[in-house]
Image (cartoon, helix red, strand yellow):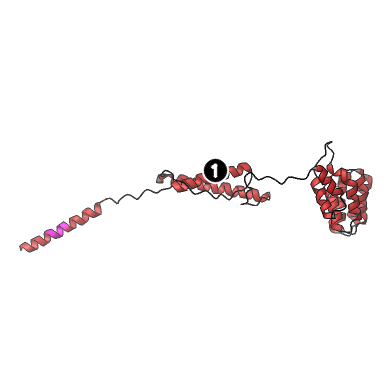
Amino acid sequence: MKPFVLAGFALLVACVALGLAVLDRPAPPAPAVDLAPIAARLDAIEARLAEAETRGAPTDLAPPRAAEAPRVAPSAERELDGRMRELEKRLESFSARETRVGVPVGQVRPSGARDEPRPDLAELQKRARDTGLSELERLAALRELRGQRDANGADARLAVLDEILRLAQGSTDGNVRADTWRQLSHVTDPRLKAPLLDALALDVHAKSREEAAETLADFLPDAGVEAALRHAAENDADDAVRRQARVSRAGGR
């Protein structure tokens, strides 16, 4: 065999050996995945959600920008994924609960915010009596008196009852009359019974009759109230009034 042929054959063998050596080398390790920012964001979300659940208010869960954090090993990826799924479930449950009770999701009461101070009892009673104010302004004061009690423990609406009854009986606005009977719910003072019976029997405004029928339930058992509710349940021209009269007779509201 000629020398140059032998040299070429040797070169070919060397190239094949070199190629096999390169292919046999192990692949370089993948660079470590830095999950620190994800971990930091999860920590922030968990803290915000825990605070919101404790406070009872919804949260937008917008986490602050993550600061420098130690590197997290790639093996922690499954743990972070599990934490994220758990947070998503908690947020979904929390948001559904807040929506049911009427709290707009995503609106958070500012930290340290306070309710506007309510006028004191005497001021509200003064406004409810003030004939210089509009009917709606006086009814707004009555609405704020509802549920409040004076120093003696009496219903705060009793102190303005006479003036409010005159407002309702003199008003030409059926909605004002209806709202008056609504705001006097659970007042069982004898002064209220006759105006309610008159409203149920005579008011031309159906909503006023309906509200009178509902508030009259507070006076049962009473023979006169029972008879008036029975008559309305059987004879009133309005379906809603008849229905409310039946409910009131049965002891409902």
Give the image location of residue 235, x and y in percent. Answer: 91, 57
For residue 27, side relative to residue 62 (left or right): left
Which quarter shows the N terminus?
bottom left
Q: Quadrant of residue 71?
A: top left
Instruction: State how many labels appear.
Output: 1
Name the dominant secondary structure of the magenta segment. helix
For residue 119, side relative to residue 10 (left or right): right
For residue 18, side relative to residue 164 (left or right): left
Q: Is residue 184 visible?
A: no
Give the image location of residue 135, x and y in percent. Answer: 85, 54
Picture residue at 60% right of the left edge, 44% below the top: 52
Q: Which residue ends up furthest to the front in the rendered image? A: 132
Q: Quadrant of residue 243?
A: bottom right
Give the answer, above or below, for where 9 lies relative to 115.
below
Q: Is residue 14 visible?
A: yes
- 196, 2: nearer the viewer: 196
Picture residue at 94% right of the left edge, 45% below the top: 223
Q: Quadrant of residue 17?
A: bottom left
- 61, 29: nearer the viewer: 61
For mark 1, give the secondary structure.
helix
Q: Which residue ends up furthest to the left in the rendered image? A: 2
Q: Magenta region: which residues?
A: 10-14
**Category of crowding for the residue at label 1, using alpha-carbon neighbours closer than 10 angstroms: few (below 14), some (14–19), many (at least 20):** few
Give the answer, above or below, for where 170 lies relative to 148.
below
Q: Amino acid at mark 1?
A: Ala
Give the image location of residue 215, x and y in percent. Answer: 86, 48
Instruction: Find out whether residue 125 is within the magenta segment.
Output: no
Give the answer, above or below, for where 118 lies relative to 136.
above
Instruction: Say which residue label 1 marks.
Output: 47
Give the image location of residue 239, x and y in percent. Answer: 85, 58
